[in-house]
Image (spheres, grey):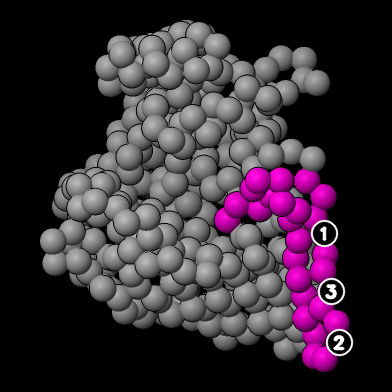
Amino acid sequence: MTARKLRWGIIGTGKIARTFARALSSSESGVLVAVASRTPEGAASFSAEFGGVRAHGSYEALLADPEVQVVYIATPHPGHAHWSILAARAKKHVLCEKPLGMNHAEVSAMVQAARENDVFLMEAFMYRCHPQTREVARLIRAGALGRVKAIQASFGIDGEFPASHRVLNNELGGGGILDVGCYPVSMARMVAGAANDRAFDEPLELHAFGHVGEDSRVDEYTTAILKFPGEIVASLATAVKLWQENSVRIFGSEGRLFLRAPWHPGLGGNPSEIVIERGKSEPEVIPVPASGTLYSYEIDAVVAQLERREATEMSWADSLGNARTLDRWRHALGVRYAADQVEV
């Protein structure tokens, strides 16, 4: 048990905010003290679900709350940069949902705000904080697959969304690349980096194909081929209108690795495991002990690294590189947002 829990405030009251609040309720390193919605009614409703924490009827009011030490930003994508920068200026530490910004320019401005105001900032890729992901990187560095040559990663959803839903709304940063494609991109960059004994690597080339909705003006399903240093090739797929395998496969000169649940390891109490196959021998199933929950690891990562202002699981440089690659993927398909025309 930690001697003092970090005091959190949440901006936004959607589904992911509630998921995060539930994780905080069982955390030994953090506690929820306040929530903010755009309306007093929305904040009050959320507060009633989580023990009557302070309810703020505006985001500005939460940033002015002296009890809040760190802010979890759970707004739609276009609000991430604005509220993260204002939080940093209010001297609040920041954990912001992915994607960190709408584009590389926004992420650069967010990192600069964190640096200037000496606060913590992390992009909320919860899977990066889970022991399963750390074990994958360790195995690759240890040569468990020999020389890594290829990566396959996918994350596609098809929730039969109405045309008005945010994932099909260009003005809200819709499309698969930003919403869930950021996961395969971040995984491929991490795996390529581990294979080259670095924290992450940037693609040397990127080519993409896909379908951009005539009405939505966002990428509804798409595949990208990336080439990394070391002659590593990655095939990445994402979608908001096409359910996909949502898995990761890594191919090396001496074996191949399979992750059945790369993005939500341990979800629903299912065991986390890594499968390695070598030739005709029986697959090696490596269980990954996990005493915490998916989001509790993320909360603990913030607390443990607060003083150094960025987390090793998702550093500022890593987020900047991820944003740059997402920009390249979108632009290859001709997907543009209003944020791309704005100087931050």
Q: Quadrant of the C terminus?
A: top left
Q: What residue range appears in magenta?
A: 263-290
Residue lying at 78% horizontally and 46% vertically, measured from the top left: 290
Give above or below for 143 relative to 158. below
- Tell me residue 193's x, y (percent): 62, 68
The reply to whether the C-beta atoms of the residues labelled 3 and 2 are less than 8 Å apart is: no
Instruction: Assess whether residue 265 is covered by the magenta stretch.
Output: yes
Q: In the figure, is residue 217 to the left or right of 84?
A: left
- Tell me residue 178's x, y (percent): 36, 56
Residue 65, located in which quarter of the rendered image? top left
- Please tell me how crowded label 2 is: few (under 14), some (14-19), or many (20+) other residues with Cα within 10 Å: few
Q: In the figure, is residue 205 to the left or right of 233?
A: left
Q: Label 3 belongs to which residue?
A: 284
Secondary structure beneath disc 3?
A: strand
Q: Label 2 belongs to which residue?
A: 281
> Which amino acid type is shown beneath numbered disc 2?
Ser
